[in-house]
Image (tube, helix red, strand yellow):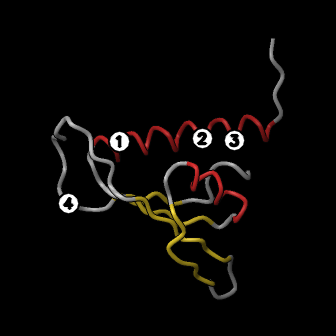
């Protein structure tokens, strides 16, 4: 039996969900954009191909780090590529 902390479990769930979303974005050959309110998560996203493209200060709210990633092109054509951008939002993975 393995014992994990609540924080470790949340991190694993979030990283798995992020991977599933990124896999679909990659399959559709779309660029991706996300915003994170937790600066501690930025290195996780950078390791996954995202680059900081801006920041925003919300009035009476958190700072947002804006990140984007270019489309990943695979040799197999996608059935649903429509030229749009996928948007992933949330405070993200690593630092929860």
Query: Considering only vertical position in the picture, is 33 above or below 80?
Result: below
Mark 2, residue position:
15
Q: As drawn, which residue projects farthest toward the top?
A: 1
- Identify which residue is drawn at 25% across, 62% down: 84
- Real-space Cα distance between discs 4 and 1? 14 Å
- Asked whether the beta carbons under mark 3 and mark 1 sit within 8 Å of each other, the answer is no
* Inter-mark Cα distance, 2 to 4: 26 Å
Q: Which residue is under mark 3?
A: 11
Q: Label 4 belongs to which residue?
A: 83
From the top left corner, tell me how far across and down residue 13 is, in percent.
62, 37
Mark 3–mark 2 CB contact (< 8 Å): yes
Q: Secondary structure at mark 1?
A: helix
Rendered location of residue 4, percent (x, y): 81, 28
Q: Using the image as rendered, state which of residue 78 and residue 76 is in the foreground.
A: 76
**What is the secondary structure assignment of the residue under circle 3?**
helix
Q: Earlier in the sequence, mark 2 or mark 1?
A: 2
Q: Secondary structure at mark 4?
A: loop
Q: Are marks 2 and 1 in contact (CB under 8 Å)?
A: no
Residue at 59 percent of width and 71 percent of height: 65
Residue 7 bears which disc, if any? none
Crowd tier of the residue under label 1, counting other residues whose Cα lies within 10 Å: few below 14, some 14–19, many 20 or above: few
Q: Secondary structure at mark 2?
A: helix
Across and down, in percent, residue 59 comes to 64, 88
Residue under numbered circle 1: 24
Q: CA distance from mark 3 to mark 1?
A: 20 Å
Q: Earlier in the sequence, mark 3 or mark 4?
A: 3
Q: Residue at x 69, y 49 (%)?
A: 94
């Amino acid at each position: 039996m393995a014992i994990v902390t609540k924080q470790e479990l949340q991190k694993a769930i979030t990283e798995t969900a992020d991977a599933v979303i990124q896999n679909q974005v990659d399959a559709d050959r779309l660029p991706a954009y996300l915003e994170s309110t937790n600066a501690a998560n930025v290195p996780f996203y950078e390791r996954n191909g995202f680059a900081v493209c801006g920041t925003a200060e919300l009035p009476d709210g958190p700072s947002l780090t804006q990140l984007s990633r270019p489309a990943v092109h695979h040799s197999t054509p996608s059935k649903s590529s429509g030229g749009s951008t996928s948007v992933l939002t949330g405070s993200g993975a690593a630092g929860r």
